[in-house]
Image: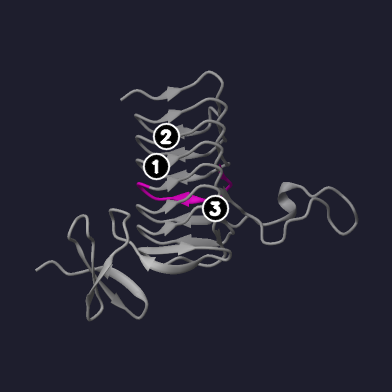
């Protein structure tokens, strides 16, 4: 499958772009970044130095993914989402000198398989977004998000569970939840959700 890179995109020759991936107008992919197969990098999006992306990821228009972020397979990052990478950001040091790259330690956001981050959400590193979790648009994530959690607000907090299809789950009783779209069952234990064992 062919790789598509628009003429106006800025893709470092030291980046690795997987087969079938597309990089759209005005997007930037920095040196050492690795994109898996069939990824889509939208208009004006930024992929920082050394960022790792799995297969089938979508980075929508103007999303900013700063290093050292890691996105596993099937991650969706909505328009204008920001992943931060600094605990204590400053432009200058206490002496008034401009800080350089080696004056601070970058920390990253990790997004597990199948998770989705809604438009204009901010993920404040270091945090991990769990498998198939859903971060609502405009939320600010300041702590780890469990697998299958739907989180909203500032700071983001869990309000529901969602299944792999992305729709809210319905309670079935005794800690069991069901996806109304696929019929898949999930089991909640100690405020964590996992797929029900196959019978």
Residue 6, placed above or below residue 72: above
Q: Which residue is mark 3?
A: 121
Residue placed at 40% from the left, 56% from the top?
112
Percent coordinates x, y for residue 170 in the rendering: 26, 67
Q: Residue at x 31, y 71 (%)?
A: 193
Q: Determine if the magenta segment contains residue 72.
A: yes
From the image, state whether disc 1 or disc 3 is nearer to you: 3
Q: Are marks 1 and 2 in contact (CB under 8 Å)?
A: yes
Q: Measured along the vertical axis of the image, is residue 160 above or below residue 110?
A: below
In this picture, residue 8 sits left or right of residue 198: right
Residue 40, labelled with which disc?
A: 2
- Crowd tier of the residue under label 1, counting other residues whose Cα lies within 10 Å: few below 14, some 14–19, many 20 or above: many
Q: Report the side of 46 relative to 91 (left or right).
A: left
What x and y, as percent, mark residue 160? 38, 67
Q: Which residues are magenta?
A: 64-74
- Quickly name the residue at label 1: 57
- Comparing 68 with 74, the one in front is 74
Q: Main secondary structure of the magenta part?
A: loop
> Which of disc 2 and disc 3 is earlier in sequence?
2
Dot 1: what SS? loop
Within 10 Å of disc 2 (Cα), the crowding (few <14, some 14-19, many 20+) is many
């Amino acid at each position: 499958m062919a790789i598509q890179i628009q003429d106006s995109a800025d893709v470092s020759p030291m980046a690795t772009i997987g087969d079938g991936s597309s990089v759209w107008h005005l997007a930037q992919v920095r040196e050492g970044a690795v994109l898996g197969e069939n990824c889509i990098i939208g208009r004006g999006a930024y992929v920082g130095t050394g960022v790792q992306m799995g297969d089938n990821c979508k980075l929508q228009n103007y999303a900013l993914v700063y290093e050292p972020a890691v996105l596993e397979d099937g991650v969706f990052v909505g328009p204008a989402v920001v992943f931060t990478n600094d605990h204590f950001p400053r432009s200058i040091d206490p002496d008034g000198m401009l800080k350089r790259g080696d004056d601070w330690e970058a920390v990253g956001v990790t997004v597990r398989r199948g998770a989705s981050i809604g438009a204009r959400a901010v993920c404040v590193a270091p945090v991990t977004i769990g498998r198939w979790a859903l971060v609502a648009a405009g939320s600010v994530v300041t702590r780890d998000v469990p697998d299958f959690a739907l989180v909203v607000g500032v700071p983001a907090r869990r309000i529901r569970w969602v299944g792999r299809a992305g729709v809210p789950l319905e309670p079935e009783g005794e800690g069991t939840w069901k996806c109304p779209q696929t019929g898949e069952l999930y089991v909640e234990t100690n405020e964590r959700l996992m797929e029900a064992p196959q019978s």
